[in-house]
Every structure is written in C-alpha cells, then in structure tokens.
Image: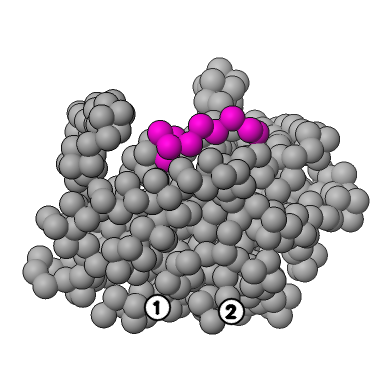
Amino acid sequence: MIELLNSYMKYTSLFILRLALKMNNHKFCAFIIWLNIKKSKKIKSRSKNTKKILVFPKSGGYEDLVETFSKTSQELSFYLLPRIFLKEIFNFFFKRKKKNYNKDYYTKFKTSDDIKNKKLYINFLTSIFRYINSSLKLDGYVSFNLFYYAEKYFEEVCKNLNSKFIILHKESVFTPMEERTALKIYKNNNDKSLAHKVSVYSESQKKILVKSGIVSKEKIVVNGNPRCDYSYRLRKIKPKGKIIIYYLIESYRNKNVFINNKKNNWNKLYKQTLNYVLDFAKQNPAYKVILKGKIGIHKKNLFNSKILPSNCFFIEGGLGQRLLKDASVVIAFNSTVVFEAILGNRNLIIPNFNNEKLLRKEILHKIKEKKYFANNKKQFIEKINFYLKSKHKDKKLSKKDYDTLKYYVGNVDGRSGTKVKKFIKAIYN
C-alpha cells in the first residue's frame, strides 16, 4: 500500500512539474522536487549535525552506497531524489529527436540552439536548487555515472551553487570490444567532466576515462566495487542445502550502447544451457534449482509452474548477488555475477558449449581460470554432480582469479566499501 501511494505521488508530482515548467515557475518546480526528496532509510545516521548529501539513485550504484555505509554513518546523511525528475526537466529544454543524440553516453551539445538551451537548463536548475537549499541545506551531490544525459551538466549547477558533485562511476566490466568502443564514444560524444572527484572500480576503467580526456588523472580514485564486499564475506560461509542457481543468459547482452549488432547474440547458448539445467532438475528432484532472470529481459510467463519441474523456481528481479549465500553451484555467463561468484568462493560453471571462449573472445570477459568452463553437456552435468557432492573449503584466491578480479571489479579483499567511505568523508568533512 505504501509503495502504491509513493508511486501515485511520484507520477502526480511529475504531472504538476510539467505544468510548473510551462509556467516557468522556479519556486513551484523547487517545491515539487522538495516534496519528492526523501531521507535514505537504508543508510542510518545520527539525527543532528550531519552533512547532507543528495543522491540520484540508480540500481547497482545505490546498492554500492548502502554497502559502503552498512554501519551507521555518523557524519553524513543521505537523501534521495528519483532521477526521473531531472530527466523531466531536461526533456522540457531539449527535444531529443536524433537516435544517438542527447542520451546516455551521447551528452555533447553540438548546435548553437542546444548550447543556448544548455545554459538555460543549467540556470533553471541552479535557481531551483537554490530554493531547495534554503530549506534542506544540502552539502553535496552524488551520481553513479559520468554519462547520464540528465545529470551530466548538473556538475555545472554545483559549480554555481559552490557545492561538490562527485561520481561513484559504477561501470567497468567491459569486454575487449566494449573497451575499444567506449574509448571512442567517451571521447567523441561527451564534454570533459567538471565533477569534483570520481571514484571507479578498476584501473582499466580509469585508463579509458583518462585516455579519452573525460577526467584528469588527478580527479580519479580507484576504490573497487563496494557491492563485492558482500561476496568476499561469503568465502568462509558454507552454503545451506544443495541449491543450484542459474543466472539466465542475456541473449542480446552484446546489443548495447557500445555494441549494436544483433548478430552478436547468445540465443543458441541460452537455449542449450536452459535445456541442460531443466533436464538435470527433472532427473534430480531432490535438488533445488533457481532460475534468476532480469526484469524486462526474461519474461515471467515463460517460466511458469506448468513448464518448470516442481523443484525449479524462477525469480524475476532484484539483485542476484544475495542468492549466492546458499548456492552450492552457480551457473553464469558473461555477467558481473561471474566475478561475484569467484570472489565469494562459490562453485562456478561457465557454459562454453560452442567454443565461445575462443571463437567470440572479443565480446567475452577475459576469465583466466580454465576450470570454470564446461565445454559440452557431459562436462556440464559432471561438474554439477561433483560440486553438489563436494565439501565447502575455505581457500585463497588463485593468482589467475586475483588478476581477473583486480582487472574487472577492483575488489580482491572485501575492503572497497571502506575505501569509498574514506573517499566520500574526505570530500565532505
């Protein structure tokens, strides 16, 4: 009921905000936004004498922040404003007609009209947040990507407000082809960032950002992925029961802002892996099998009880990382959860039934340890059975796993949250 009321308030507020924008009423816009700023319930802080930080929450990034401040934040209080409000204001000033123009990762204004509107947009937001600050007394702002179109130029608003805008950049897990394309897109389609400081997961992402000229080397700090701290804490924890989790393959994982080629899909591998998993579930009813999907990608109606064996369950949304705790076997492919499973000391199987590791290596993450790969159905089933019968062992990361994790998520010791906390506190204290 509370969620329904919050949703109703948000969309009612957006409707009223559109009217206020048409009237060019700064105070009314500020009031609407102020109504929709809520104190974070997941990050606790003392009630008085804290620095107030406004966050534009994004899935993954906000969870990084929650993990970073999993214990009480004594000096900082975090407030949340749904990103859709900045998008609404942005869309009022700019009519986005071209396919690759003024969207995430394509934020650079090129026409004289758009440059003029950019100034109007920045001035309008500056005026709005001056009104908001007169009430909330905000000390800083946090975003989770350097290239979100509606937040890109909020950095200039912060300059006008004499406030510090920081980016906890949550992207780093790129394939070799994505790395090359990202460098070109960063450089050619975005202006240099004016953010006060930027935190990134890995040296590889820092290298791309610096080389592209988006951020100077002095402004970037490599802290690793705070969400992976949770995975690291699982290393010594024995999974309960005998549970197999298959993180469903995204057939069009390679069709994104960096790679737009429908031929680069994983349809065949997706079907093979799903069929092998379901066959195993049918023949082994004593084991619980979880299929973890993504909202908007894996449709729930395709995984109903009529299709799935009785010991097989489909979970549509939410962060899949928390499912690792009780996983005896993890099946995943070309996803961040691969690195989380490695860090969490879980028995990982990566499908490689069509020699994808060799034939399509340019669009695959570079996993150095060969033991994770299953090259055919026989190997796949044998690995599942072997892991289900094996005892959990607390073991150190191999050199190959250490190098892989360091490259992609920058977290090999479960201390990224501590590093990010120091990073943020040093800026705002």
- The picture places residue 196, in percent across and down from the top left corner, at 42, 72
Name the amino acid, label 2. Lys
Marks 1 and 2 in Cβ contact (< 8 Å): no
Magenta span = 90-99
Q: Nearer the viewer, residue 159 or 367?
A: 159
Name the amino acid, label 1. Phe
Answer whether residue 234 is visible to the viewer in this image: no
Q: Secondary structure at mark 2?
A: helix
**The residue positioned farthest toward the left in the image shown:** 48
Left or right position of 8 against 356: left
Answer whether residue 420 is visible to the viewer in this image: yes
Q: Which residue is mark 1?
A: 423
Q: Nearer the viewer, residue 321 or 287?
A: 321
Q: Nearer the viewer, mark 1 or mark 2?
A: 2
Q: Secondary structure at mark 1?
A: helix
* Residue located 55% across and 37% down the image: 293
Left or right position of 423 against 334: left
